[in-house]
Image (cartoon, rainbow, N blue to C red):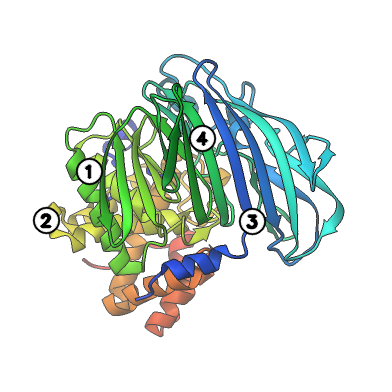
């Protein structure tokens, strides 16, 4: 996700600057051949702002242990009244709820396992986990069918999940299986810092029915059927980490980037053609630098959103609050996440810097490779250095300057943003100067190629650069990630 916050009162000045291994369709189909499958049929009610859905999960145990139960994240419950963990800070409330406080949530009305009715069991730290128990252990590589029915109440909010004016954002709206690692399910709650989501790839078949005035932008190419009052949109997506939908009264512009259909959905953009071109150029540039975009489509969606933007596989939010160059920067940053998060996954709760640092620096690389945008690479790095230096000066005795920590361990959203986006970008620039361009870009391509559709960890990124450069880089990364770096490489 792209954050844009000003900290002038605290720092005097602060701005967050956001700045070959191919991936063939055959590669995507191979990856998708042994994945869980989510089939969701959802109906949006404009009258009571609810989404009613049936969901079938043909779940495969992809872990190396037998499972006696399965946990599902219930992210919408973070929006309910009285939630222990809120998606918003106190400072965000007024902007998030321009029409006053509003609440949401998800109600699971039934669960079946292989056709047998099961108790609806809710747990977690914040009533945010659905626990589905099995009659018999599910062995590795075995499958089980889980059916559920639920209703999502969508708050009147400018957020990942929320409706406001012209759009309905349906991000993280459905129960999604938790990752099992280190002997337990990763069931962290909805922290307000960063993107508190972590899941493996799966295949999706999603149908959304909504009033006819809405167009559905989805993580996949939509097939539309209509009645007199409703519009039904079906989309399938192979090997995606999650699935998102935005309903809105959109205008559309489309183009093709290296075979991928890119559609820009908007309602208030006087420079819509430029926004589409930036989207197309982003896909082409990142294809050439890192490896091929794996999906057939990409939806770039202008919507009502509190922060700068938000990434989902094959779909990105772009906040209508951004203007001019910031709007374009957000498009580029969020599209970079199609490589770093969507295709190459990571635990965003434990290692948020992995995808955000790479997406942020990728946006700066975009400008270096596309001189026609008249944005100077060195100036962006210098701005990041200035921002980081100002932050360190202002919070010399209170801020934790380490990068690799869990989301709840960041003291403030400002600290999270500086350590993850700003310092991360400086680190990548320093690494590039240390090992040289050939090894640097070879390392990025290797990291992408080796970890497509998988969960990557810091050691995977470090190892890719070590193999590309022939250097031991553990000390370099430890110094940056632990917060002990004292100097920057000269520009």
Front residue of 455 and 93: 455
Q: CA distance from mark 1 to mark 3?
A: 35 Å
Q: CA distance from mark 4 to mark 1?
A: 27 Å
Question: Which is more foreground, mark 1 or mark 3?
Answer: 3
Judge whether 481 appears above or below 125 on screen: below
Residue 296 in the figure: left or right of residue 243: left
Residue 311 spot, x, y in % from top left: 42, 46
- The answer to whether 450 is drawn above or below residue 367 in the figure is below
Residue at x 43%, y 63% (from the top left corner):
480
State the CA–CA distance, disc 2 to disc 4: 40 Å
**166 or 403, nearer to the observer:** 166
User: Circle 2 sits on which residue?
Assistant: 372
Q: Which residue is mark 1?
A: 275
Depth check, mark 2 against mark 4: the one in front is: 4
- The secondary structure type at the circle numbered 4 is strand
Using the image, tell me which numbered label, if any, was put on residue 208: 4
Q: Nearer the viewer, residue 490 or 208?
A: 208
Are there few (<14), some (14-19), or many (20+) residues within 10 Å of tag 2? few
Is the Cβ of the residue at disc 2 closer than 8 Å to that at disc 1? no
Classify mark 1: residues with Cα within 10 Å, few (<14), some (14-19) or many (20+).
many
Q: Which of the 4 image quarters holds residue 149?
A: top right
Q: Which of pointers 4 and 3 indicates the residue nearer the eye?
A: 4
């Amino acid at each position: 996700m792209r954050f844009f916050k000003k900290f002038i009162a605290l720092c005097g000045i602060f701005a967050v600057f956001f700045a070959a291994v191919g991936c063939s369709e055959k590669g995507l189909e191979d990856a998708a051949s042994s994945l869980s499958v989510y089939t969701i049929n959802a109906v949006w009610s404009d009258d009571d702002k609810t989404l009613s859905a049936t969901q079938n999960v043909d779940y495969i145990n992809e872990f190396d242990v037998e499972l006696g139960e399965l946990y599902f994240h219930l992210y919408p419950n973070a929006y309910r009244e009285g939630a222990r963990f809120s998606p918003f800070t106190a400072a965000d409330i007024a902007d998030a709820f321009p029409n006053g406080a509003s609440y949401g949530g998800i109600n699971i009305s039934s669960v079946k396992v292989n056709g047998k009715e099961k108790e609806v069991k809710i747990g977690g730290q914040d009533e945010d986990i659905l626990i589905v128990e099995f009659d018999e252990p599910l062995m590795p590589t075995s499958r089980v069918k889980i059916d559920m029915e639920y209703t999502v109440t969508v708050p009147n909010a400018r957020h990942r999940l929320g409706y406001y004016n012209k759009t309905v954002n349906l991000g993280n709206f459905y129960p999604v299986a938790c990752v099992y690692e280190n002997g337990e399910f990763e069931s962290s709650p909805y922290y307000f810092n960063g993107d508190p989501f972590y899941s493996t790839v799966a295949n999706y078949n999603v149908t959304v029915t909504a009033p006819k005035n809405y167009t559905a932008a989805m993580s996949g190419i939509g097939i539309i059927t209509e009645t007199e009052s409703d519009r039904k949109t079906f989309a399938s997506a192979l090997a995606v980490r999650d699935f998102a939908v935005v309903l809105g009264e959109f205008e559309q512009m489309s183009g093709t980037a290296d075979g991928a259909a890119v559609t820009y959905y908007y309602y208030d953009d006087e420079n819509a053609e430029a926004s589409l071109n930036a989207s197309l150029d982003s896909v082409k540039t990142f294809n050439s630098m890192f490896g091929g975009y794996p999906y057939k489509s990409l939806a770039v969606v202008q919507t009502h959103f509190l922060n700068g933007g938000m990434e989902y596989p094959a779909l990105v939010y772009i906040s209508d609050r951004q203007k001019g160059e910031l709007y374009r920067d957000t498009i580029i940053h969020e599209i970079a996440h199609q490589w770093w998060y969507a295709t190459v996954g990571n635990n965003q709760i434990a290692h948020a810097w992995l995808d955000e640092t790479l997406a942020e620096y990728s946006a700066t690389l975009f400008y270096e490779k596309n001189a026609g945008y008249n944005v100077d690479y060195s100036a962006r790095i210098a701005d990041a250095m200035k921002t980081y230096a100002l932050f360190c000066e202002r919070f010399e005795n209170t801020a934790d300057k380490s990068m690799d920590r869990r989301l709840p361990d960041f003291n403030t959203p400002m600290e999270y943003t500086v350590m993850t986006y700003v310092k991360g970008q400086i680190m990548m620039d320093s690494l590039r100067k240390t090992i040289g361009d050939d090894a640097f870009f070879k390392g990025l391509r290797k990291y992408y190629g080796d970890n497509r559709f998988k969960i990557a960890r810091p050691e995977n990124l470090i190892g890719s650069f070590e193999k590309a450069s022939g250097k031991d880089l553990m000390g370099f990364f430890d110094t940056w990630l632990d917060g002990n770096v004292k100097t920057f490489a000269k520009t």
